[in-house]
Amino acid sequence: MLIFPCSGGSNVGQLANETAKRLTDQGVGGMYCLAGIGGHISGFAEATREVKKVVVIDGCPVRCAKKTLDHADCPVTIHVVVTELGIKKSSDFHLDDIEIVKVEKAVKEKLKK
Ligand code: SF4
């Protein structure tokens, strides 16, 4: 399973990034390189199409990560948008561990379904 956070320049983008790192540390899946997909680097989209599940974590409704994978014809299994969990977008990069856990739980809940 591959995990793609948008890793955007906001608290919610970085919450997506931290969650992907944490899920990777826990062995839930492997964080992968969204920029490789967006940059049309050889092998990245192909490798993504070969895995069973693709998890995408976007910070906000702009959905940059999901759109990047859509453009590359990479099917997305689970999509979580951090602002839809009640977390407001800001430029405060002091991330709250409670919020990381909230995003982590949202991904895990969707994986159970
Ligand atoms: S989805 Fe939102 S937070 Fe993430 S990169 Fe795009 S604009 Fe930034």
Image: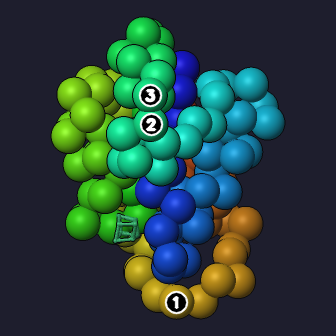
What's under tag 2, amino acid-wise? Answer: Ile
Residue carrying label 3: 42
Name which quarter of the figure residue 25 lies in. top right
**Quarter of the image holding residue 23?**
top right
Q: Which residue is mark 2?
A: 41
SS for dot 1: loop
Q: Residue extending furthest right?
A: 25
Spot the residue most to the front.
Answer: 42
Question: Considering only vertical position in the picture, is 78 above or below 98?
Answer: above
Compared with residue 107, is residue 83 higher up or lower down, i.e. above or below? below
Q: Amino acid at mark 1?
A: Ser
Q: What residue is at 42 percent from the left and 10 percent from the top?
A: 50
Q: Quadrant of ligand 1?
A: bottom left
Mark 3 Cα shell of 10 Å, populated few (<14), some (14-19), many (≥20): few
Is ligand 1 less than 8 Å from the beta carbon at label 2? no
Callout 2 crowding tier (Cα within 10 Å): few <14, some 14–19, many ≥20: few
Disc 2/disc 1 C-alpha distance (Å): 30 Å
Residue 17: percent from the left, percent from the top? 60, 56
Q: Is residue 43 visible?
A: yes
Mark 1 crowd level (few <14, some 14–19, many ≥20, 10 Å Cα) = few
Mark 3: amino acid: Ser
Residue 105 pos. (x, y %): 56, 44
Q: Residue at x 53, y 27 (%)?
A: 2
Q: Quadrant of the N terminus?
A: top right
Asked if disc 3 and disc 2 are in contact, CB closer than 8 Å, the reply is yes
Which residue carries the number 1 mark?
Answer: 91
Marks 1/3: CA distance? 33 Å
